[in-house]
Amino acid sequence: MFDIAEELKKLPAKPGVYIMHDKNDAIIYVGKAISLKNRVRQYFQSSRNLSPKIQKMVSKVARFEYIVVDSEMEALILECNLIKEHRPKYNTMLKDDKHYPYIRVTVNEPFPRVMFARTRGKDKAKYFGPYTSVQAVKDTLDLIKKTYHIRNCNLSLPKEKNSRPCLYYHMGQCNAPCQEMISREKYGEAIEQVLAFLGGNLSLITKQLEQLMKDASEQLEFEKAAEYRDLLGSVRKMAERQKADDDLTVDRDIAAIATAGEEAVVQVFFVREGKMIGREHYYLTGVEGEERAYVLQEFIKQFYGGTPHIPRELLLSEEIEERELLESYLSERSGRRVKILVPKKGEKERLVELAEKNASMVLQKDAEKIAEEEKKTKGAADEIAGLLGLPELGRTESFDISNTSGYASVASMVVFDNGRPNKAEYRKFRIKSVQGPDDYASMREVLSRRFSHGLREREEGGEEKFSKFPDLILMDGGKGQVNIAEEVLKELHINIPVCGMVKDDKHRTRGLYFHNEELPMNQHSEGFRLLTRIQDETHRFAIEYHRSLRGKEQVHSILDEIEGIGPTRRRALLKAFGSREAISAAGEEELAAVPSMNAAAAHAVYTFFHPVREMR
C-alpha cells in the first residue's frame, strides 16, 4: 500500500521530475522541480494556492514517483520527453503534433535534386523551410520542375544511366542528364537559380516566366502560355508576402496567446530571412485556471522541443517565468544562441499585437465549433457518466466477438477517450482456446487475457500496451455478456463498472444494461449518439479483422493443395500478388519471377488454376 505521507518524507532536496499516478496507475501529471522535496510537498499541504484543475488532479493521486537528475536543465528535458510520451491528462497539452516539411536540395551530388523532406537531416544538403503547408511545398516543387527542369529520379549520376529518357523529359520537366543531354555546368547554373529562388530572390524566375509566357503566345501555344501565366501568378503571390523587418539575417517566430475558459490558442508567425513564410495556430487543452504566461510557456516547451527548426529569436506576447532556462534549452537543441524577447515598442511589438489579434480571432471564430465538438464528445461522455452515477468517464473500452459458425473467431477492443475514438489504443484478439460458436466463452478468454496482461505490465513495468484500465467497460450485448465480464473482473480482483449495449429487434442500438436493469435513454441525446458510435465502431473493427483472417485462411487452404507449394512459397506468392485472384490470373513467367519460385513450381500453380481439358 502506497502511503503518500510517508513517501513525502523521503523526497530529496534535489532537482528532478515527479510523476503522479491515479488508482489505475495511469500517469495523470508530470512536472519538474529544482527541489523535489519542496515542490511535491506543496501539492498535499494546502489547496489554497492551487488552481481548480490541479486540486482535482491531486484528489485523484494514488501514488507518485520521481527521478533525480543533476540539473534543472536535465529536469526540463526529461519533463518534455515524458509529457510527449505519456500525454498526461492534467498537463497543459498541445493538441497538434505537426511536423512541418522542408525542401531539400542535394547540392553534394554532381547533378543535384530538389526534394520534399519531412525532417531536416544532418547531411550536406541545403534545406529551406520549414513550410507551414505541405501543399505549398508541393506547389513550389512543381513550379521548380516546370521552370528549371531539375531531375526527379533516384539515379546516382553520372555513374548510372537510363536506357532512354524518362516521362518527365517528354513532358518538358527534365533535361535528361541521365542521357547527357545537358552538361554538368549548365545543370549547375539551373541549380544556382533554384537556390536563389528558394532563398527569396524572385526577380529572376519572374523574368523567365514572363519570357516563356510571351514565347508560347507568339507560337500560338495558348495552353502552355496559360500554364506559365498561372505559375507567374503563384510567384507574384510569394513576392507579396509581408516583409517582417529590416534585419534579413535573423530567423524569428512571433508567438501570442489568447484564452477563453478551457480553451487556448497560440498563433505563430514564421519569419525567415526577414520574410513571413507562413503562420499557424495551435490549440491547447487543460488550461482552465492557468495564467496565460504559464500556458504559453508550456507551448514553447512542447512545440520547440519537437520541431526540427528553432529560430534565433522568439518574440512572445507574455513574460514567461522560465525564460532564461528555456533560452539555454533551445540554444542547446539548435547549436546556437536563441533569444526569447517580449518587445515593448516598435515594429516587433506591432507584430506581436498582430499575432495576438489573430489568436483571438481564431478562438472567437472556432468557439462555436469547439463547443459543438465538445458537446458531442466530452459532453456526451459526461452524460453517460451521469446516467450511470460515475464521477467521470475518461477512458471507455468496448468489446465484441465476430465469427462465422465458430470459424476464425476474433474479438475487438476499441477505446474512446473523453468521447473521442483513440485508434492507437485499439486491440484485436484471435480466439485461441474456444472451438465453435461460443461467444460467452470467447469473451471470457478475451477479457481474461486483456486484464491479466494489464496486471502483469503494472507489476513488471516496461511496455504499456494494456496497463491503462478504463473507467467503464461496454459489452456488445446484454445480461449474458455483462455477467461474463463481471465474473472475470471479480476473479482478477479488479473493480471496473460494466455495461451492456442492448439492441432492438432490428439490430439497432436501444440503450444500456447496467446493474441488472435496462436504463432508459433519450434517443435524441448526445450521450445516446455516442453510445451508438461506440457500438458501431466496435462491431466494424471486429468484422474487418474477421474478414481479413477469413480471406487469408481461404487463400492459404487453396494454395496448400498445390504440389510443391509450401509455407515459404505460399507467403512469397501472397506478398507478390496480394490475393488468390491475382495469383490465378498470373502467367507462368510472372509466377516464376517471384522469389523462392522456379519454373516447375510456377507450372504447378498455373496448371492448378488453368487445368487442361481432356479431348473427346
Image (cartoon, rainbow, N blue to C red):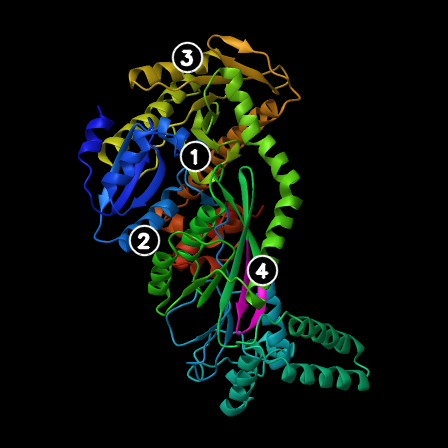
Label 2, label 1: how far apart the Cα atoms are:
25 Å
Q: Quadrant of the N terminus?
A: top left
Closer to the eye: label 2 or 3? 2
Label 2, label 3: how far apart the Cα atoms are:
47 Å
Q: Which residue is mark 3?
A: 483
**SS of the residue at dot 1?**
loop
Q: Which kind of residue does numbered mark 3 sit on?
A: Asn
**SS of the residue at dot 4?**
strand
Residue 101 appears anywhere in the view: no
Answer above or below: position of 528 versus 345. above
Give the image quarter of residue 213: bottom right
Sequence order check, earlier mark of 3 and 1? 1
Local packing at callout 3 (Cα closer than 10 Å; few below 14, some 14-19, many 20+) is: some
Q: Which kind of residue does numbered mark 1 sit on?
A: Ser
Q: Which residues are magenta?
A: 267-278
Closer to the eye: label 2 or 1? 1
x and y, in percent, of residue 302 in the image: 42, 51
Give the image quarter of residue 448: top left
Sequence order check, earlier mark of 2 and 1? 1
Q: Are marks 3 and 1 in contact (CB under 8 Å)?
A: no
Q: Which kind of residue does numbered mark 2 sit on?
A: Ile
Give the prevailing secondary structure in the magenta stretch: strand
Is 323 one of the magenta-colored residues? Answer: no
x and y, in percent, of residue 277 in the image: 58, 67
Sequence order check, earlier mark of 2 and 4? 2
Q: Which residue is mark 2?
A: 77
